[in-house]
Image: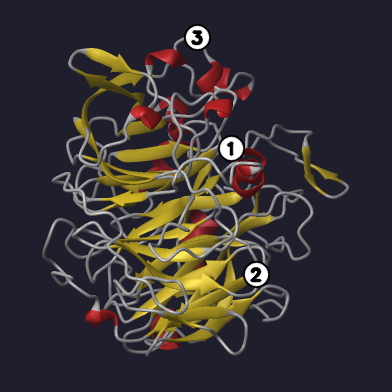
């Protein structure tokens, strides 16, 4: 995720007169509706929750009736142990205290008592690579590499999203970008890097071990001391972005944010007899042969019997490809020196530029942030959202952003949206995505009729939004502005979404860890 804005701005220089910047969205039936927005004084459409109201505090513009509070701000709020909240908040998962976590007890005592009725835990990635001012502090028992500054923090919040406590979940990792929730109430955090031991990890420091792994983090400090520093090497070593976990089989879908050449979507299938649950992944990783446990494959899309080498060629919502899964024989030791995507068999798969967020809801939603001919893509767009069928046998284009000629201008038809990144399924219908594009940055919803609408606008800077996720009852949406270090809790009349079929109905249904 970190390279997106820089790369996009390079491609957009001089492009203001190219194309119409049309935004196209649609549901899984392939119905074309466009954004459907109407003009108003602010230039933002009235679909969804209506116009965005300028924030007098200059932080976050929201629709009328919505409010925000600052959950945490990098360098400002103190955590358990005395350090301040780290820089660069990114993707996040929310875990209700009443959910699969059960009765938690750790270094902080009873965590359920800490958050109260209706509360829970926000596990927050920090995409820290080298020069950020506030790192995740080295913490005894949960630090993978004391020469690295990334990781996750856990924020205990009440039913309104107010911060009760913040503590380290894992430290000593690099560029913790996105990840994914598990059905058993933990967070899989992904290192978006291929940094090897000896490479620069922080100012004046070099990594002591290889990076590029996935780690499992829990709200429970006791569980983190047992498993958070165990790299899940069977999930491959590459520039991981996000994961989506099948709630019953334990199959894990993974996205790769990489270029030169572009990355892939991968699938990990557990070995026979594996029972997914608390501690099971770390136990498997520690077992004999754990580095290559299970089956690890890359996605290969096929249309009419013909290989589709690049997802960017799809421009029509509802486009569906059959999916074959190609074995990846070099996910472990060979990947230490040669990236998976550059190995000889990699072109058998289907590539995409900037594969970003993922989320499970009756299938795996995956996002491609943008594509340009100059980055090796076969066609150009400003974002795609795909859905992989629950059985992994097909993939369907859920929505697409056309080329945006000038993302710095708020257009009346909503065409200023570009660069989708993190994604979540909304309990109020449709999906919610965060922008990491150029110019003005938004949190964007796409409703069940395929219409795009703004939920929030960054008034602080042009830094990306990250990590939209709802609490258990859908009353609070958490979201961050990465470069400015803010994490917000947004409350308001979520149920008034214009035209929504309501939670639990329509093509998407409601969000949930085990849905």
> Closer to the N terminus: mark 1 or mark 2?
1
Label 2 neighbour load within 10 Å: few <14, some 14-19, many 20+: many
In front: 509, or 235?
509
Q: Quadrant of residue 96?
A: bottom left
Which quadrant is the C terminus positioned in? Answer: bottom left
Quadrant location of residue 337? top right
Q: What residue does disc 3 label?
A: 344
Q: Residues within 10 Å of mark 1 (few under 14, many from 20)?
A: many
Residue 472 in picture, x, y percent from top left: 29, 75
Whether residue 142 can be seen here: no
Q: Considering only vertical position in the picture, is 326 above or below 313?
A: above
> Percent x, y for residue 381?
44, 39
Residue behind mark 2: 485
Q: Position of residue 104 (x, y in %)?
A: 39, 74
Query: Mark 1 highlights which residue?
Result: 212
Residue ID at (22%, 59%): 514
Q: Is residue 207 placed above or below 328 in the rendered structure? A: below
Give the Cα distance between marks 1 and 2. 24 Å
Q: Is residue 458 left or right of residue 120?
A: right
Say which residue appears at 75% left-offset and 39% top-offset: 208
């Amino acid at each position: 995720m970190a390279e997106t804005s820089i790369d996009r701005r390079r491609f957009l220089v001089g492009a203001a007169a190219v194309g119409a910047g049309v935004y196209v969205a649609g549901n899984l039936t392939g119905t074309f509706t466009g954004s459907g927005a109407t003009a108003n004084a602010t230039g933002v459409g009235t679909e969804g929750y209506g116009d965005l109201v300028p924030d007098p505090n200059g932080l976050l513009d929201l629709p009328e009736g919505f409010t925000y509070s600052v959950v945490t701000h990098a360098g400002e709020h103190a955590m358990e142990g005395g350090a301040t909240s780290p820089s660069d908040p990114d993707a996040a998962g929310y875990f209700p205290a009443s959910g699969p976590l059960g009765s938690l007890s750790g270094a902080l005592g009873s965590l359920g008592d800490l958050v109260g009725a209706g509360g829970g835990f926000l596990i927050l990635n920090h995409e820290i690579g080298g020069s950020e001012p506030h790192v995740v502090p080295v913490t005894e028992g949960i630090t993978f590499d004391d020469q690295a500054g990334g990781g996750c923090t856990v924020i205990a919040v009440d039913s309104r999203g107010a911060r009760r406590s913040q503590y380290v979940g894992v430290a000593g990792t690099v560029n913790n970008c996105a990840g994914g929730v598990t059905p058993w109430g933990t967070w899989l955090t992904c290192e978006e890097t291929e940094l090897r031991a000896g490479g620069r990890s922080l100012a004046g420091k070099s990594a002591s071990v290889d990076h590029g792994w996935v780690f499992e983090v829990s709200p429970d400090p006791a569980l983190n001391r047992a498993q958070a520093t165990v790299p899940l090497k069977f999930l491959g070593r590459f520039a991981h972005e996000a994961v989506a976990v099948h709630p019953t089989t334990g199959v894990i879908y993974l996205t790769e944010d990489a270029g030169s050449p572009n990355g892939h979507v991968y699938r990990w299938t557990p070995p026979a007899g594996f029972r997914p649950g608390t501690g099971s992944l770390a136990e498997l990783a520690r077992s004999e042969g754990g580095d290559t446990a299970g089956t690890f494959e890359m996605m290969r899309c096929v249309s009419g019997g013909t290989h589709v080498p690049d997802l960017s060629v799809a421009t029509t919502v509802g486009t569906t490809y059959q999916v074959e899964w190609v074995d990846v024989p070099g996910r472990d030791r060979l990947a230490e020196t040669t990236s998976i995507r550059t190995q000889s068999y990699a072109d058998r798969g289907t590539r995409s530029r900037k594969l970003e967020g993922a989320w499970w809801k009756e299938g795996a939603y995956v996002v491609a942030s943008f594509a340009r001919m100059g980055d090796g893509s076969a066609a150009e767009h400003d974002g795609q959202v795909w859905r992989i069928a629950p059985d992994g046998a097909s993939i369907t284009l859920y929505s697409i952003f056309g080329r945006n000629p000038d993302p710095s201008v708020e257009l009346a038809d909503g065409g200023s949206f570009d660069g989708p990144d993190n994604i979540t399924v909304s309990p109020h219908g449709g999906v919610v995505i965060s922008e990491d594009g150029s110019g003005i940055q938004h949190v964007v919803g796409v409703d069940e009729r395929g219409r795009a609408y703004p939920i929030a606008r960054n008034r602080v800077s042009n830094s990306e939004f990250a990590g939209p996720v709802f609490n258990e009852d859908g009353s609070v949406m958490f979201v961050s502005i990465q470069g400015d270090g803010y994490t917000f809790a947004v409350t308001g009349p979520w149920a008034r979404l214009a035209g929504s079929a309501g939670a639990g109905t329509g093509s998407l249904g409601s969000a949930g860890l085990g849905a």
